[in-house]
Image (spheres, grey):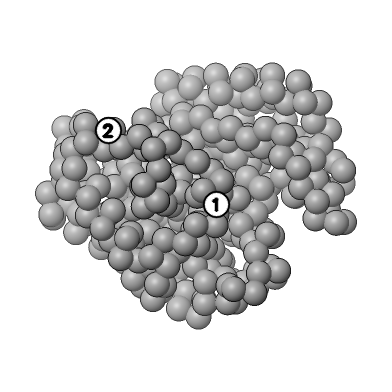
Amino acid sequence: MTRVAAIDCGTNSIRLLVADLDPATGEFEELDRRMTIVRLGQGVDRTGRFAPEALERTFAACREYAAVIAEHGAERVRFVATSASRDVDNREDFVRGVVDILGVEPEVITGDQEAEFSFTGATKELTGRTDLARPFLVVDIGGGSTEFVVGEEHVRAARSVDVGCVRMTERHLVVDGEVSDPPAPERVAAIRADVEAALDLAEQTVPLRSARTLVGLAGSVTTVAAVALGLDAYDSAAIHHARIPLERVREITARLLSSTHEERAAIPVIHPGRVDVIAAGALVLQCVMERTGAREVVVSEHDILDGIAWSAALKE
């Protein structure tokens, strides 16, 4: 067994997984998994730069994670930065801060690499299931981008497109610096138009409609699942591999898009950091399901973070 630490730094959140892995047998033992909402991508779509306060929130989480990694004595650490970190003007400030705190340089991966990690993390446990038809379509709805991957045991095709819950919220739902609650119909229509255009783009590379099982990843999907299941508190075990029908996703999306900030905040399973962006994230999921013809989404709590951990264990 190799003890590894994997860090996934996205547009909205930063997450840590410390685990013991055996690549030869597929054995996996989770030691610590945690998530912090840092909103690193705050304003990036508009300014092309990381905001100083967003960097400081991210560095504070890194300092917490460094202590956890040291406590567990991880042999290998891999830090992957995704959508918001690809093209910003002040990326070096981010890199320098992470290296100073964690001693490793963040790897700013491509959308295709991101998709590969997501697929590995999401499907490693599903390959032996006989009740789920292949091929899988893994959809990872992030803050700034969404990844689509079709494959069976291995990736057949992948594409990353620039629609995510934070990007869509900032682009279409923010009015005079505040999220409009509830949004006007034309603003919802504008999000849907962006998502449909992104799906057109994804379909140039990925045969979305050929998949037999849709597997959904990341906070927007798991939060919708938690609401669909009627949980009083977030329960990873209940959410992992839950199967949520399209009609339930439509109901929840309509509810979120017609609610105020206070009404969404009163739903106990919605993390405070997701209250303003979950409606857009749910709409992205609904559009994906409608485009692909999926009658349900199989929700996975194991995603890119688990894929990063497996890659760290295999890395020489």
* Label 2 secondary element: loop
Residue behind mark 1: 240
Say whether residue 78 is visible.
no
Say whether residue 232 is visible.
yes
Question: As displayed, is residue 23 above or below residue 275?
Answer: below
Q: Residue at x 64, y 25 (%)?
A: 65
Count the marks. Answer: 2
For marks 2 and 1, give the CA distance.
23 Å
Question: As displayed, is residue 78 above or below residue 280?
Answer: above
Q: Locate residue 122, reporting x and y percent.
A: 61, 57
Q: Locate residue 110, reporting x and y percent.
A: 59, 53
Q: Amino acid under label 2?
A: Ala
* Picture quarter with the N terminus: top right
Q: Is residue 87 left or right of residue 303?
A: left
Crowdedness of circle 2 by 10 Å Cα count: few (<14), some, many (20+)? few
Residue behind mark 2: 266
Q: Is residue 32 left or right of residue 197?
A: right
In the image, 81 versus 247, the foreground residue is 247
Q: Residue at x 66, y 37 (%)?
A: 17
* Label 1 secondary element: loop
Q: Specify which label sits upstream in the sequence, 2 or 1.
A: 1
Question: As displayed, is residue 245 above or below residue 46?
Answer: below
Q: Locate residue 11, reporting x and y percent.
A: 46, 39
Q: Amino acid under label 1?
A: His
Residue 199, image quadrant: bottom left
Residue 196, image quadrant: bottom left
In the image, 184 versus 54, the foreground residue is 184
**Numbered circle sitting on residue 286:** none
